[in-house]
Image (cartoon, rainbow, N blue to C red):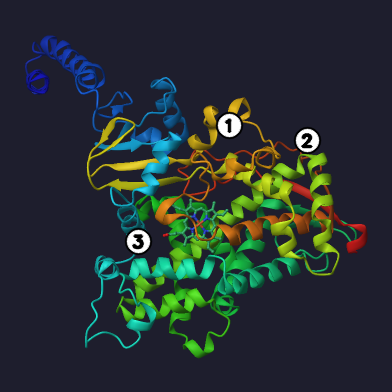
């Protein structure tokens, strides 16, 4: 009824505004004001009061547009505003983006329920969006969700490769889990990546575009470039071998551009606005295309998962362009977050000399031989692990997305079928009810003092439920191994900046929607001066 009244007043006012006669203006403006006031009263006061079981919406000024701009300009600020608007109750609330309602879930128990109930809250809808954003054709996406049936016409390899006859998307997820969850296949990949990182982090090998200045005894390093270069190189070679670098010598530069701008791809920004991203993507796609055309027997260094995914996409009859897009997506997932994690862990540690000393002491036994002992680092370095978990808590700006399949109550509030649920990690990781009054501070020993926090429902750097990151073990080895080797092999100093003042601690770039660990502001970096440590010379 109120809606009818609102539209009645609104259409009379619009008619008046469109009229040639100037007199109706006198009527039109107050009419519009009244209509607008009624709409605000109804939407944000009366309706929530009358329908108390429904999820309340954060007020906004412009109908339809709602919070669209705020979401893209400062998602964390918007969600924080929502939490404050509902007086820190952490009950589910909603925001409006281009006319659609998005449910924001931040209370630890609600988060656990969304992740655990994969029937009511589906991950597949978001995966479908991701496949589209990465460039899979409509037909390829249809093919990817198709569940094959056993029978005489099935591909001869189907039964051995896909004994449960899952859809291609779910088969690829399984392949990734087999590669990355603890077992022989993870060991093979982890040893491959770590031995490359170990080799890079020797004084005699540490040359590249990340070296800003160099003398025989010291080098100035851009840590941002260093992390990007070493992690991309080691991860990429462990996946595709050296062959991909023959097909595209500028792999590292193009992947850096792709990573920086991947948010635009994930959020479906039209390609006309992203020429730099398109160019980098095209170069990488050509390299992957050539890789796909290379016979399997010549792709001798590839990871088991890469070979399996290439075979599976062929078996499903996916078109070539979509196969390339699928591999690009997997390649991106394998290194983009790890680069940023490495950078932030390094930055937080280097600014704290007593932590540098403590971590050196703790990790030193892993370097008593020439090669780094990664199992020692993974199993016997609790302060390093705690530091890593604490940095992830502070810098992870990603969100999990699920679609509500069936009307479901969370904390007494009704989430309607068809709506999208967003779980924003930053807000989970800053919740003062969980993290106390030091929530904003870097406390390296936090997880050492309270180990249970790492499995708390409000700590989700790797997501949860069906999409719980299978790469978390590899990521931990890469970041912790990288840091331990850097601290043990080099004496490190933070020189003054170009302006003669102390370098500012790098800032998180909160102006772009994050797809994982938040990147550093584009024109900030952390330059360190390094010398070989005495024993490593
Ligand atoms: C610090 C580093 C990393 C972080 C913070 C991270 C974070 C995440 C998160 C939050 C998700 C779940 C997304 C969601 O629920 O919407 C995810 C999924 C995934 N991650 Fe990671 N990740 C990291 C490293 C890696 C690495 C090294 C690999 C592979 C080598 C990897 C492979 C994947 C894959 C394949 C998925 C999708 C899982 C699925 O569809 O079931 N990640 N990651």
Query: Which of the two discs, 2 and 1, labels the residue nearer the N terminus?
Result: 1
**Disc 3 versus disc 2: nearer the observer:** 3
Check contact, mark 3 vs mark 1: CB within 8 A: no
Question: From mark 3 to mark 2, how far is it between C-alphas?
Answer: 44 Å
Residue 312 to residue 59: above or below: below
Check contact, mark 3 vs mark 2: CB within 8 A: no
Question: Could you say which disc has been placed on residue 131 in the image?
Answer: 3
Query: Which of the two discs, 3 and 2, labels the residue nearer the N terminus?
Result: 3
Please report the residue visible at 70 percent of the width from the left and 66 percent of the height from the top.
197
Side of 96 relative to 223 (left or right): left
Question: Which percent across, then down, holds residue 447?
Answer: 65, 41
The picture quadrant where one finds residue 293 is bottom left
Which residue, given by chain and number where applicable, does mark 2 sit on?
502
Residue 270 to residue 254: above or below: above
Query: Which of the two discs, 3 and 1, labels the residue nearer the N terminus?
Result: 3
Question: From mark 3 to mark 1, how far is it between C-alphas?
Answer: 36 Å
Which residue, given by chain and number where applicable, does mark 1 sit on?
435
Return the residue nearer the eye: 481 or 28. Answer: 481
Which quadrant does the N terminus fall into?
Answer: top left
Side of 479 relative to 125 (left or right): right
Mark 2 CB near ligand 1 (8 Å cut): no
- At mark 2, the secondary structure is loop
Residue 253 visible in this rendered orientation of the protein: yes
Please report the residue visible at 70 percent of the width from the left and 40 percent of the height from the top.
444
Question: Which percent across, then down, holds residue 281?
Answer: 45, 64
**Disc 2 versus disc 1: nearer the observer:** 1
Side of 358 relative to 390 (left or right): right
Check contact, mark 2 vs mark 1: CB within 8 A: no
- At mark 3, the secondary structure is helix
Please report the residue visible at 80 percent of the width from the left and 61 percent of the height from the top.
366
């Amino acid at each position: 009824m109120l809606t009818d009244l609102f539209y009645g007043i609104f259409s009379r006012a619009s008619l008046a505004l469109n009229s040639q006669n100037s007199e109706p203006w006198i009527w039109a403006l107050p009419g519009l004001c009244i209509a607008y006031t009624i709409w605000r009263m109804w939407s944000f006061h009366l309706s929530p009061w009358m329908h108390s079981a429904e999820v309340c919406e954060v007020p906004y000024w412009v109908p339809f547009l709602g919070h669209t701009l705020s979401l893209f300009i400062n998602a964390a600020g918007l969600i924080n505003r929502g939490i404050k608007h509902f007086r820190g109750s952490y009950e589910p609330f909603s925001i409006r983006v281009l006319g659609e309602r998005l449910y924001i879930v931040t209370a630890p128990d609600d988060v656990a329920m969304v992740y655990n109930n994969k029937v009511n809250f589906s991950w597949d809808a978001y995966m479908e969006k991701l496949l589209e954003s990465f460039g899979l054709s409509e037909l390829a996406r249809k093919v990817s969700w198709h569940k094959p049936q056993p029978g005489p016409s099935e591909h001869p390899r189907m039964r051995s490769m896909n004994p449960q006859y899952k859809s291609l998307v779910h088969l690829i997820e399984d392949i990734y889990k087999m590669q990355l969850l603890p077992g022989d296949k993870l060991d093979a990949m982890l040893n491959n990546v770590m031995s490359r990182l170990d080799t890079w982090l020797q004084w005699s090998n540490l040359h590249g575009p990340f070296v800003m200045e160099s003398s025989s005894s010291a080098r100035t390093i851009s840590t941002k470039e260093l992390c990007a270069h070493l992690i991309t190189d080691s991860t990429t070679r462990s996946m595709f071998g050296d062959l991909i670098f023959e097909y595209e010598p500028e792999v590292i530069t193009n992947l850096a551009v792709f990573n920086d701008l991947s948010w635009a791809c994930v959020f479906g920004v039209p390609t006309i606005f992203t020429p730099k991203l398109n160019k980098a993507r095209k170069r990488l796609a050509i390299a992957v295309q050539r890789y796909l055309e290379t016979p399997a027997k010549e792709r001798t260094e590839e990871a088991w998962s890469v070979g399996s995914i290439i075979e599976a996409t062929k078996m499903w009859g996916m078109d070539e362009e979509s196969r390339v897009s699928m591999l690009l997506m997997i390649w991106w997932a394998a290194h983009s977050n790890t680069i940023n994690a490495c950078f932030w862990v390094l930055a937080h540690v280097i600014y704290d000399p007593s932590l540098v000393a403590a971590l050196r002491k703790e990790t030193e036994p892993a370097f008593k031989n020439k090669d780094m002992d990664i199992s020692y680092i993974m199993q016997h370095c609790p302060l390093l692990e705690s530091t890593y978990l604490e940095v992830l808590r502070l810098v992870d700006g990603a969100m999990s997305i699920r679609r509500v399949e069936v009307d479901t109550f969370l904390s007494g509030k009704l989430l309607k079928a068809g709506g999208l649920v967003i779980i924003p990690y930053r807000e989970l990781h800053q919740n003062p009810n969980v993290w106390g009054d030091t929530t904003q501070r870097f406390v390296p020993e936090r997880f050492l003092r309270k180990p249970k926090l790492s499995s708390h429902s409000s700590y989700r750097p790797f997501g949860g439920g069906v999409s719980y990151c299978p790469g978390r073990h590899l990521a931990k080895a890469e970041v912790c191994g990288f840091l331990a080797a850097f601290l043990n092999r080099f004496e490190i100093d933070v020189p003054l900046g170009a302006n003669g003042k102390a370098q500012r601690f790098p800032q998180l770039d909160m102006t772009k929607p994050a797809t994982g660990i938040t990147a550093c502001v584009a024109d900030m970096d952390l330059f360190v001066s390094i010398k070989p440590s005495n024993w490593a010379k």
